[in-house]
Amino acid sequence: MWTIPKPELTALDTFNICIERISVAATRLRLEGIRDLIENAEQAFDDRAAATELHLIAEANGIAGANGNVTAKEMEQLYDRHMARQKSRGRDTYDKIMMAAEHGQCPFCGHLPVSTLDHSLPKARHPALAVTPFNLIPCCKDCNHNKGTLGPNSQESQFLHAYYDDVTHDRWLYAEIVEGSPPGGTFSVEAPAHWTAATAARVQGQFTALKLGRLYASQAGRQLQNIKRSLNTIYEAAGLYAVREDLKNRSESCADVSANSWEGALFEAASQSDWYCDGGFGE
């Protein structure tokens, strides 16, 4: 749910690279006959994405071109064989899109490293967008798998698009400390009051579908253990309030980088827990 710059590569540039030197003349001829449709699909995608209307783009099982039909399967193979495959003609383009993610982190979860490209609208149902850069988002394999291959059927079910949707300036991720030995944390979405119902549903739906609560909780226990020693030193020297102040500073430092840092939310929750600040960190 983090934003990254839109690719500067055009769909037609990418398409031309992918079909270059296809050896079967008939196949290449049919692909050459859909160039204008690839451009049209890119423009429609750009317009709909900017208006949060990707769910209105109709699905298709092929593309009717000037030189004959191109099937969805052929477009999937074009992407798989001539763009995603290592050492393929389009792999440089694939890698350029991958490198757009800041610090190499997945924009869906903001935590795991980028390792693949996700089709915002699935290529099997939107073959004209199979190699369109605007439809390809760098992400981690876990988020790619959890997102699945179903497209949106409403505005509320539409995943946030890293090139078009920006919720990074609003605080929506919160945490609570789980008392125990060792302590842990849970995470949840709390929509700001000024959000529309659709935006709130999209963020909550994506948080749930990508299992981000589980991902962040799995890291929270380790993070709390990592600071156990330093907090104990502070507690012995100055007590509960000094521990609380240290945790607040940690939270604010994380928030300076990202308003929805899971570490920042965790440290904030820890600073607000009397149990944790009064020695619970040492359990």
Image (spheres, grey):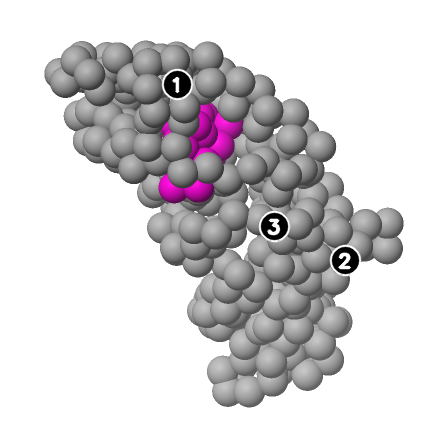
Q: Quadrant of residue 96?
A: top left
Disc 2: CA contacts within 10 A as few (<14), some (14-19) or many (>=20): some
11 to 156, vertically: above or below? above
Q: Are the residues flagged by discs 2 and 1 in contact, CB closer than 8 Å?
A: no
Q: Residue furthest right?
A: 194
- Asked whether the viewer can see residue 16, the reply is no
What mark, if any, has residue 191 been given in the picture? 2
Return the x and y of residue 277 as percentages of the image width and height.
Answer: 67, 76
Crowdedness near tag 1: few (<14), some (14–19) or many (≥20) residues, C-alpha within 10 Å: some
Towards the viewer: 236 or 182: 182
Residue pointed to by mark 1 = 65
Q: Which residue is mark 3?
A: 153
Residue 103 has which mark?
A: none
Quadrant housing residue 4: top right
Nearer mark to the viewer, of 1 and 3 = 1
Q: Which residue range is magenta in the image?
A: 124-138
Return the residue nearer the eye: 45 or 87: 45
User: Cα distance, mark 2 to mark 1?
Assistant: 45 Å
Q: Residue at x 28, y 32 (%)?
A: 74
- Left or right position of 181 against 167: left
Q: Residues within 10 Å of mark 3 (few under 14, many from 20)?
A: few
